[in-house]
Amino acid sequence: MANKVERAVSYARDDQQPITTRIVTLLIATLSAGGVLFIFRDRLDDNTLLAVLGFLALIGVFYLTASVIGVIGLRRRDHAAEYAGKFLDSLSDGVCITDDSGLIVYANPAYMRQNGIENPVDLRTPEQVLSLHDDAANAIYRLANAKLEGMPMREEFRLPTDVSGRIDHPHWYRVTATRVDGMQSGPMRSWRIADITADREQQEVYFLELQKAIDHLDRAPVGFFASDAQGRLQYLNATLADWLEIDLAGFRPGQTRLDDLLVGESLELVRNVRAAAGTRRTATVDAILSKTSGESFAAQLIHTVDGAGEHVPGPARTIVIALGGENEGVRDLRDAELRFTRFFNSTPMAIAALDADGRILRTNTSFSNLFGPVLGADAIERRVKFAEIIHERNRDSFAAAFDAARRDQAKIEPFDTVVPTDADERHVRVFVNAVTGPQAVVNDENGEIIDGDIASREEAAIVYAMDTTEQKALENQMAQSQKMQAVGQLAGGIAHDFNNVLTAIIMASDLLLTTHTPSDPSFGDIMNIKQNANRAASLVRQLLAFSRRQTMRPEVLSLTDVLADLRMLLS
């Protein structure tokens, strides 16, 4: 067995002798043979010399013939085998190659060091080494099954000591077994044993640090939750779960939504925080949160949103600060801020604060709803100018009102405009007010504010916008109604006068009919005059009814006759 092991270990090193050495050896032997023949040429008779030369000639003919048919050839230096041997020797992982019968064909120095062996005679196969450890039994069983099936296999396991049993410290190993075909001596099996203890220890340290970080986050004095683009909660810490009375053991990512967490306008305020694609935006929102029991509490949200695309919300991470537990003065201030925030965001009038350049600094929910079609998701982030979101024909009016606000004028006339991109022509009335503060000092030549305190003030004006679309529609309806009322009054006045004229015509016709007999040629014309006069009187009654100046009384009517009378008016 020892001889077989020594021979097997030397297989990988046999082919490393340079072919140059062999050629030199052959040359020396040939020259030596020629020299011997030359020195002893006198002592050899011709028959012996011919016999020797004939023998050498036979060897040459045999070699040439064998070379032609491929039996013998010059052995070239196998660089691949040489490089492979050096590469395997340089590996830090133990490599052992066994033949199909389980004998070791090759073992690199790392494999010998892993097993604590210096003499190749003491080498054992990986199966024999690992079978000494009970913790590797399952791995050996699976590797053996893979060997029978001819499939590659990888196993990782933990041993209480190292493979050699000399180091009393837990070690992790990764064993890879691969079948190698195409070898002249038959199929072989390659074993690679890697000591991954350092990697596993690093993973354990990382896992412990991660556990500590999660524990710190869970025990933080503020709440935290993360939500996806659809508003579904993916994570919340223990502090927030305790505030919301949520059992973390039963919490499943994606089951709870922001709709279940935020109350009233708070949800709309959070949804209005958007960012452009590839950017991130953080906003502070005062909100009301709902517990699972139905109770609510006030909190301040520091909401960070990632931009996913145009008008597309992205994932968000939010810090929740409960507005409670402070001293009385701080609590009163918080309550006042919360009441103002509720009032500011709940008012139906759109409100926006503008800086000295007319750019929008902050808005309420109504402003976002009113100007949403032209604002865009990142309008506040980009500091859009207010003049850009109103109709161009009204920008001069806004410029005059904004200039008056910058001069702190008290009375500024409002102006009407429309939302530019709204196909329904949404009408808006805009009020521009100055920010309350000290009187501004203005340069008479160029109109610039030269007071440093005023110029450094963040808000230069407050804009209030009110949707007047329905009011405009009512005004148009009222104007039309007034026009129709005037037409009715005019028609009523004319109808009364015309009715008097028709009464005289009818009376005159009746007098003429009393003086003319039916056989009189003029009788038919007089009857025609009377009939047309009566028809005109009927139209006058209808005009009086249209103008609502006719005296009405209940009467049984025939619908057919009424429609017949109205036919002419309708025509």
Image (cartoon, helix red, strand yellow):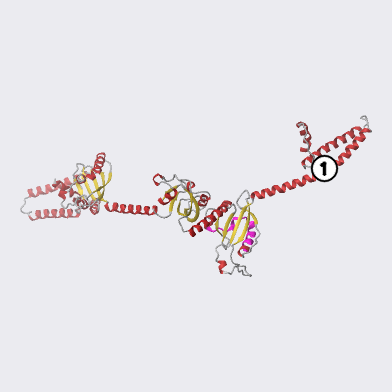
Residue 394 lies in the magenta-colored region = yes
Relative horizontal placement of residue 56, taking residue 550 as reference (left or right)? left
Which residue lies at the image location 62% right of the left edge and 70% below the top edge?
Answer: 443
Relative horizontal placement of residue 455, taking residue 290 as reference (left or right)? right
In front of the other: 525 or 190: 525
From the image, which quarter does the C terminus lie in? top right
Q: How many marks?
A: 1
Report x, y in % for residue 144. 24, 41
Report x, y in % for residue 169. 23, 52
Residue 107 lies in the magenta-colored region = no
Relative height, residue 252 to residue 384 (above, below): above
* Residue reaching furthest to the front: 328
Which secondary structure lies at badge 1? Answer: helix
Relative height, residue 440 to residue 162 (above, below): below
From the image, which quarter does the N terminus lie in? top left
Main SS of residues in magenta = helix
Reading the image, the residue beneath label 1 is: 495
In front of the other: 471 or 58: 471
Which residue lies at the image location 6% right of the left edge and 51% below the top edge?
Answer: 44
Relative horizontal placement of residue 561, taking residue 375 as reference (left or right)? right
Q: Amino acid at mark 1?
A: Ala
* Residue reaching furthest to the top: 519
> Is disc 1 surrounded by few (<14), some (14 to 19) or many (20+) residues within 10 Å?
many
Relative height, residue 477 to residue 360 (above, below): above
Report x, y in % for residue 517. 93, 30
Q: Which residues are magenta?
A: 382-403
For residue 177, say whether it is visible: yes
Report x, y in % for residue 162. 22, 50
